[in-house]
Amino acid sequence: MLLLARYALVLVAFLSGVAQAAQGQQYEVYEAPLPIASLNRDRLFNESAYGQALIAQLTERQQVLVAENDALQVELEEEEKELTERRKQVTAEEFAPLAAAFDEKVKRIRKEQGSKSARLAEDLDTARVSFFRGTEEVIKELMAERGIIYILDEQAVLLSSGEGDITSEALKRLDRLFASGALAVADP
């Protein structure tokens, strides 16, 4: 019992010392906003004249590929109809190599068109990377002017007053640079 009382007294003395130390300590209160901003990268890409030019270029290439695919599909359907008619006129042994050749042609065309589609998707990713490299200086200027040390992607921000979002200002500056020719879309 005496040992328990001794521990209780030591604990009370310790806690009182902690309380006194805490009362005497001053904590800094931040009155100025922290130098952090947010940026909506998707909006910057999709709404800026520079991003829209990149998107237009890729959309044009996609439309060409779709038209090419449609033409190939019509061609293959015609060839398949002819092959079906031919089947009625030849023996199974004569037809087998014709069918195999048509099947190989279809596989080759699908592979080629799939490669073109995959290349177009890669080019979109490359265009986005190129876009953000091209916009880096604008964003760095905004950071320097406003004393920003961190920029968070808007998707990573849980709550915000909206006052730290620099997307609109970055859009204006990018559009001015694009209009002046300082930023240009490279040929594919």
Image (cartoon, rainbow, N blue to C red):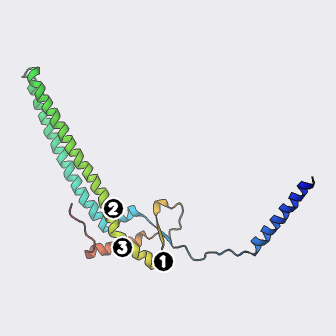
What amino acid is found at the position of numbered circle 3 in the picture?
A: Glu
For the point 15% across and 30% down, the residue is 100
For the point 22% across and 52% down, the residue is 63
Query: Mark 3 falls on what kind of element?
Result: helix
Residue 141 coordinates in the image, percent (x, y)? 40, 76
The answer to which of marks 1 and 3 sits earlier in the sequence is 3
The answer to which of marks 3 and 2 sits earlier in the sequence is 2
How far is the residue under mark 1 from the one under mark 2? Answer: 25 Å
182 on left or right of 40: left
Query: Mark 1 falls on what kind of element?
Result: loop
Q: Furthest residue to the front? A: 3
In the picture of the structure, the residue carrying the numbered disc 3 is 137
In the picture, the disc for residue 147 is 1
Based on the displayed image, in which of its 4 quarters is residue 110 positioned?
Answer: top left
Q: Furthest residue to the bottom? A: 145
- Badge 3, how many Cα within 10 Å: few under 14, some, many 20+? few
- Badge 1, how many Cα within 10 Å: few under 14, some, many 20+? few
In the picture of the structure, the residue carrying the numbered disc 2 is 129
Along the viewing direction, whichever of 76 and 145 lies nearer the viewer: 145
Q: Furthest residue to the left? A: 89
The answer to which of marks 1 and 2 sits earlier in the sequence is 2
Along the viewing direction, whichever of 142 and 26 lies nearer the viewer: 26
95 on left or right of 39: left
What amino acid is found at the position of numbered circle 1 in the picture?
A: Gly
